[in-house]
Image (spheres, rainbow, N blue to C red):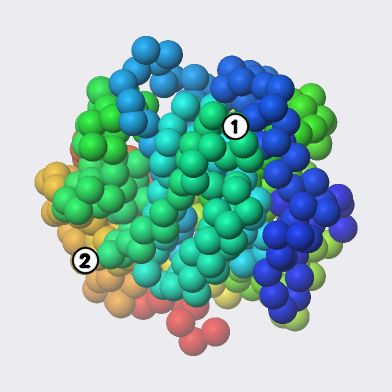
Amino acid sequence: MPAQVLLKNRKPDRIASLAEYRESGGYEALLRVLKEGSPEVVQKELHESTLLGRGGAGFPAGKKMMAVADDAPFPRYVVCNADEMEPGTFKDRVMIHADPHMLIEGIILAGYGARAEEGFIFIRPEYENAARVLKGQIEIARGEGLLGRNLLGSDFSFDIMVHRSGGRYICGEVTAQLNALEGKRPNPKQPPPYPTEEGLWGKPTVLFNVETLACMPHVVRNGAQWFRDLALTESGAGTKIFPVSGKINKPGCYELPMGVRLSEIIEEHAGGMRPGSEYKCCLPGGASSRFLPKQHYDIEMDFETLQQVGHRLGTGAIMVLDQKTCLVGATLNLIDFFARESCGWCTPCREGFPYIRDLIFRIENGQGEEQMIPMLKRMCGHMWSSYCAFAPGGIAPLESLLEDYEEEVREHITLGKCPLKNE
């Protein structure tokens, strides 16, 4: 296995303790910036590291932090997105159960860099055990002077609270998450103003994913160049945790250098395809990414390389499908999820997903008609008129189904049934 950074303290049956995290260099970055550095040092290292957000959007973390103006009002907040409701994505849960203090230090550093005084971990209800782990370790950190008033004898004060979400996928959207934290209905808000200007309770707020925050102590402690050198591609930086599931022998989370080839992830780390299975395609970045066809089986898994071929790295969650998998049925399953999870705020999302689901259901169950293919294509175009990114992400699998596997859709209509249902 390549050198581990984020999962280096991972144990098979328990979380890493505070002592174990410290032995591996934990809290050295925080101690250094509190004694010798400044918020600008944290911002500079993150900016030069080219760390891109690991929650799906891939926005530069340093740029987001630097978007909080020097003269912005106080108090300021840091929000950690541990909602992780994307089907097939389970890396944040694994990291929390592996090394919770890595996340805690990352949140504190983000707070220091943004001159914030309070952080919130927004965690999904199904992750109750992870929420208990975090709450317990936060108490330990507070007892060691790592949280609370005057951290480690400095003039910087910061604390963290664990907020248990009420659920729903839409809560993972930045502005919807802030609404949920305030106790409001989690409808997205259309910026501007951006959360770094007016976020939680109208104050400047920076929001990062668990994996993004876990990278921060390593960037600050080892330097931006060290972080960039971890990647295998020139455009990449750092390592990436890839949750791999589907028709492979060893499902799980694998920390690998950014830019590792998809074929290597599947064949060497995930144990290869199951007996009798051949690679057909995969969703390379979670449920809201496009089916990646076989011709890209050897692609480098990096934000830029996937973008060049019209795909997204997203969360890096790889769902592997084989030649026996019906892509119409798989798309129906995904669209059913997105139809259920829509907040219902705007017409394209609220009305579009149920309508699309009905069309695909009829095609999958032998009631399809040729005219339904252009109807679905038109609906894909309409979904881009939605209020937030939920709908464009949700129809990504359908768009690729119609572009790359239209013959499979047409075969359902011609035969009057799913050709793979009995295989």
Quadrant housing residue 69: top left
Q: Quadrant of the C terminus?
A: bottom right
Seen at 60% across and 71% down, the residue is 246
Q: Where is residue 47 in the image (x, y as percent from the top left)?
A: 61, 21
Residue annotated with mark 2: 358
- Pick the front one: 406 or 61: 61
Secondary structure under tag 1 reads loop
Secondary structure under tag 2 reads helix
Q: In this view, does 251 lie to the left or right of 365?
A: right
Disc 2 marks a residue whose amino acid type is Asp
Q: Position of residue 142 (x, y in %)?
A: 55, 54
Residue annotated with mark 1: 154
Seen at 74% across and 48% down, the residue is 26
- Pick the front one: 146 or 192: 146
Residue at the far bottom: name it: 422
Q: Is residue 160 left or right of residue 372?
A: right
How far separated are the C-alphas under marks 2 and 1?
A: 60 Å
Q: Position of residue 421 (x, y in %)?
A: 46, 82
Crowdedness of circle 2 by 10 Å Cα count: few (<14), some, many (20+)? some
Q: Residue 212, relative to residue 359: is it above or below?
A: above
Seen at 54% across and 37% down, the residue is 150
- Pick the front one: 190 or 103: 103
